[in-house]
Amino acid sequence: MTLAPLTLPTSADPADWLAFLDARSRAALPQAEGLVDRLRAHEAGDPAALTTWNDLGVVLANASNSCGLLSQVHPDAGVRDEAEKLETELHGFRTRLMLDTDVYARLAALEGRSLDDVLGEGADRVLADALRAFRRSGVDRDEGTREVLRGLSERENDLSQAFSRNIRDGATSTRVPAAALDGLPADYVEAHPVAEDGTVEITTGYPDTHPFLAFSTDREARRAVMTTFLNLGWPANDAVLADLLAVREEEARTLGYSGWPDFDAEVKMIGSGDAIAAFVSKIAADATDSAARDAALLTERARQDHPGLERLDVADARHYGEVVRRERFEVDAQQTRTYFDFTRVRQGLLDVTGRLFGLTYTAVPDAPSWHDEVAVYDVTLDDTGEILGRIHLDLHPRPGKYNHAAQFDLVPGVAGRQLPEGVLVCNFGRGLMEHSEVVTLFHEFGHLLHHTLAGRHAWVRFSGVATEWDFVEAPSQMLEEWAWDHGVLATFATDAAGEPIPADLVDRMREAEEFGKGYYARTQMFYAAISYWLHQERPADLTARVAELSAEYATWAQLPDTHFHCGFGHLGGYTSAYYTYMWSLVIAKDLFSAFDTEDLFAPDVARRYRDTVLAAGGSDDAAVLVERFLGRPYDNRAFTAWLES
């Protein structure tokens, strides 16, 4: 049987998309209620109850994914608002479901039985995961406690949505003198017309803010732009975040945990909140010497322009990092970007990953979508000709759109039932790209590959990026390595005359990138410390506590009167676990050690990695998948060697 992709509205009319949401998400609620009734009707000990549980999971995932995506990407505010409302309704249903003692009893009656022989491989794991999730929701508590937890869950969802909405809809801009564009690329200058008052507008969107901070020679303008950027979500999100931290803490303590970090870490590789704090401290300490050495070089260079400067701040760091790379390593980002035309990069990404993993991407130019800039491709496995799924690339900024870079699920793949569909949501410019943006594109595409390749499991719980949360970044971080290899880049990185990027330039780019890894690591640990300690302590003054953490962990000085935490969107989804980016990087470096750096297109190891790690989805613990691929347990030797080199 050939599976068809999801049917999306063919019209841009918001009414059609509202009708789609009604049919895809709202209509799922009575369907889900029917499955709950069927689940309750199973006799105690009937293994078929787990199959019904899986059916329910498919229905809820389909409904949640559609409204979760459209709330972040649809151009019409009315559609986004309706999608958010549906997210809330579905979250409420899930909360009630996970506190339903009758449903829990039907599944708990299966505990201790060997279901794999009856229902197929993975059944025992699905049951164990479901029962753990029920108990973590508080289903085994008294009725009064369950009611408290129900209210807390709904409140947490409302606050998380508000936190994200305030960042997404709070996009703003800074007006700076036109002369502040000195040092910016010609295409950037052309895209920023001068107003009658002699100023230009720099928005908080990444394609505006990041190049300006890197290339503008006007220090005061850089500080103004950075201040605006660091005040996204302020002041509204200060109160929202305080409430969100309190609700999470109350939920965790009601369930018997010492606090939210312990509750959240229980289902991750790291295991406990204390382990998070220890990991953050260790990585920060390991990176201290490297960070201090490289920061001193940046500061020394900055003093040539600003004598008496004591310490670089966050508005200076990107600029002087660029200056030092240009002068010390002869890497000029404005030169390198001439090799990275967006259209060629996008096609190159598809060519590289297709060749590496044995995939073919077929453009579907007439595929309906929520915006006409979204590119759609069907993905086929070369070995068998099997259609694996469909991907949607939504890569340019627009008003009201999610303003970071992420992969969103649209459809979870389920063997024999539905093809996986995933969406890459980024905010790149439409012309030339910085190499750092190319790296980001490879990274996020790694998530999309993971979602697509792991879409052939019978159990929806295993579908896609379904491993422990602190492993999900590792495959994407490893794929970044292909964006640093000359043999790979030369296949698509060409200048206007068609000349490929020179090998010696790529070598210098890599050397320049390695230059700042110490302060990069400490910056990441600053973010991880915010994520952990705000949840662990719930300080009365969030801004003051963030300033203290900056002084302890960050290499660069804060700007006065800024409130980074209000725009730190990861506090919504990652909660206390931002450490996972660096935790995953340790594993990513070890995974990459299995590849031949002299031939990154070597098929054998790539296909083995594809099948043992990516295609496995959540069917086993991440540590088991990695050991299966490497032939040994993972360790930190490759990461330590990288950090200390």
Image (cartoon, rainbow, N blue to C red):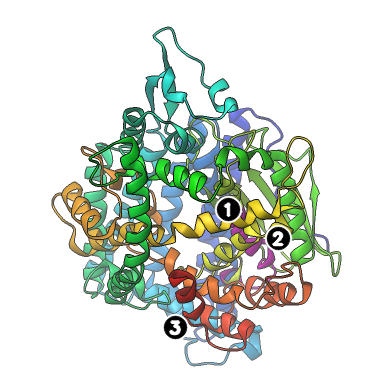
Q: Earlier in the sequence, mark 3 or mark 1?
A: 3
Residue to which mark 1 is pinned: 509
Dot 1: few (<14), some (14–19), or many (≥20) neighbours within 10 Å?
Answer: many
Q: Main secondary structure of the magenta part?
A: helix
Task: Report the span colored magenta.
Answer: 442-461
**Residue at disc 2, secondary structure:** loop
Foreground label between 3 and 1 = 1
| Cα separation between marks 3 and 1 | 56 Å
Mark number for residue 418? 2
Q: Are marks 1 and 2 in contact (CB under 8 Å)?
A: no
Which element type, helix, strand or loop, lies under badge 1? Answer: helix
As drawn, is 603 to the left or to the right of 264? Answer: right
> Is 210 in front, or is 121?
210
Amino acid marked by disc 2: Gln
Q: Amino acid at mark 1?
A: Met
Cα gap from disc 2 to disc 3, whole angstroms:
28 Å
Q: Is residue 253 or residue 32 the one in the foreground?
A: 253
Disc 1 to disc 2, C-alpha distance: 43 Å
